[in-house]
Structure formats: C-alpha cells, structure tokens
Amino acid sequence: MDELEKKSGVTFTLSLDELPELPSGIEENLFRIVQESLGNALRHAEATEIRITVKLKNNQFLLHIKDNGKGFEMNTNKKGAYGLGSMQERSDEIGGQLRVSSRANEGTLVEVRVPLEG
C-alpha cells in the first residue's frame, strides 16, 4: 500500500483484523479481487482516497474497498468492462458473495463476504 500510495498520490487507509490463515485458493482469489478493484479505482475513478477494510465477523471473511471517486451508473454496460465479471467469477469460485455499489459522483464500494468453515 505504501508503494502504491507514493506512485499514485492516492491516500490509502487499511484496517486489517488479525485473521486465521486462509486456504490458498481463497487467498489468491481475494487478492485478485483487491487487485482489480484498486486498478479500477486508480484508472477510472479519479479517487483521492481509498479505504480497505478486512475483518472476520460471525465466521465470515469480510472485505470492503471504498473509494471517493466519481463513481459510475451500475446499469451502464461498457464495452471491454470485464473486471466486474471477473471479480464476480472469483467470488463465486470461493463460495463468496460480491456486491458492488456505485453512484455517479459518490464513489464505489466493493464488498466481498466469504463464509469460513470451522
């Protein structure tokens, strides 16, 4: 995050709970979702702040990525916009639920919930 903050000029805030070790398949897919979300925010949103929250609650892994960028209309189909579909596929693959909410001039929130066993 520190390196990305220096390169992009965007302020990052990270809130990270202590978590159990996740199976590698879950960890890899979550990493790719974060990577895609940050890439979208940095390339398209014109955000100046991005907050990432990772926590464990009620035996669920919760990931929130919120930016203060320009947002977008959710019902707009854009050619070449494969990132959201890819994030959905990755979330489905690990039994998670993905929710993306965005409104013009209000930023975007990406939320992922993954139930954990045991």
Image (cartoon, rainbow, N blue to C red):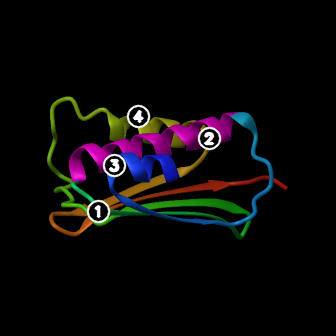
Q: Position of residue 106 (x, y in %)?
A: 22, 69
Label located before the other in sequence (3 or 2): 3
Which SS class for mark 2? loop
Which residue is label 1 attached to? Answer: 48
Looking at the rendered structure, the secondary structure element under dot 1 is loop
Query: Toward the viewer: 23 or 16?
Result: 16
Indicate whether 39 appears above or below 64.
Answer: above
Q: Residue at x 42, y 53 (%)?
A: 5
Which circle's residue, 2 or 1, is located before the other in the chain? Answer: 1
**Is residue 30 one of those drawn in magenta?**
yes
Residue at 14% x, 48% y is: 76
Magenta residues, as a range?
25-45
Residue at the right extreme of this rendering: 118
Give the CA distance from mark 3 to mark 1: 9 Å
Residue at the disc numbered 2 = 94
Q: Which residue is mark 4?
A: 86
Q: CA distance from mark 3 to mark 2?
A: 30 Å
